[in-house]
Image (cartoon, grey):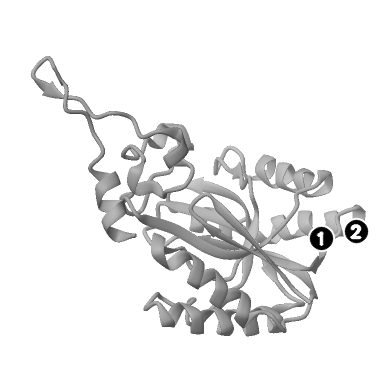
Amino acid sequence: MSSGLKLLSGYGSDEEDADEKQRLPLPDSLKENFPPPFEDEVIDDPEQHDGRARRYPHQRGNWNSIVYIPYQRDVPFDLLCDQIIDHCNPTVALKKIQEPHVSLTRTFVLLYHWIDSFVSSVKGSLQTFSRFDLQFDGLKVYCNEDNSRTFLALTVGFGKMEINKTVQLLDKVLGEYKLHPFYDEASFHMSIVWALGNKKTELESMIPELNKIFDASLNDNLDLTIPITNYICKIGHKIYNLKLL
């Protein structure tokens, strides 16, 4: 396989055009069957991502990956986010998280030839794990490691024990690939809105009022008791559904 991949990576044209050797595009049939090493270089443009920038450069053959609990947004949830955004404006300009979720791993990088065995190991480690319910119990402010973004998140209350057990199982799998485990002092949460830069001080001063908005939403029609029936393992553009018993 490796020799075949080397041959494909050198696929090109022998014709000359304006004294420069032109590279033929990879056939669609091969693009469907082979990973990003054969794609064009990824150019990061923060203007296309609301000012967000990659924390490390894209490298061919490296697949950004994460395991998480998915959350399906609904009208009451979006209304809560809108109320929070309105309350914080104009002091902090917030945007909605488009795919809210509870992370079970850090973002990590897999090599292409690790993917199948990694997914198999994760499925094996979770094969006897049962479904459970999860609830959120309030709002908290978080910053990412380089302080380039600030998040307002719902913290996990009920269901924390099951998530802890899951993280321990996943950490063992990550260790087999010499990948970083989850954070030592994990604070399980689901980010719902975000802002550029470090806005922790500003948002933390608003937490008492924001939690009043949260509590009012719960008393109205927001149901944040979530039946957890599956996890998601996302590797590059690939999505693996990890069903629980």
Query: Does residue 221 appear to the left or right of 71 in the view shown?
Result: right
Relative to residue 53, is residue 138 depicted above or below? Answer: below
- Residue 4 rendering spot, x and y as whole percentages: 30, 53
Instruction: Kindly identify the residue that appears in the image at 66 percent across and 43 percent down.
Output: 85
> Is residue 234 in view?
yes
User: In the rendered image, which quarter contains the N terminus?
Assistant: bottom left
Kind of residue at badge 1: Asp
Quadrant in the picture for residue 42: top left
Q: Nearer the viewer, residue 203 or 61?
A: 61
> Is residue 111 in view?
no
- Badge 1 vs badge 2, beta-carbon distance below 8 Å: yes
Query: Does residue 59 appear to the left or right of 86 in the view shown?
Result: left
Q: Secondary structure at mark 1?
A: helix
Relative to residue 184, is residue 65 depicted above or below? Answer: above
- Residue 216 rendering spot, x and y as whole percentages: 85, 56
- Residue 189 rendering spot, x and y as whole percentages: 63, 67
Instruction: Kindly identify the residue that appears in the image at 40 percent across and 33 percent down.
Output: 27
Q: Which residue is mark 2?
A: 219
Q: Which residue is mark 1?
A: 215
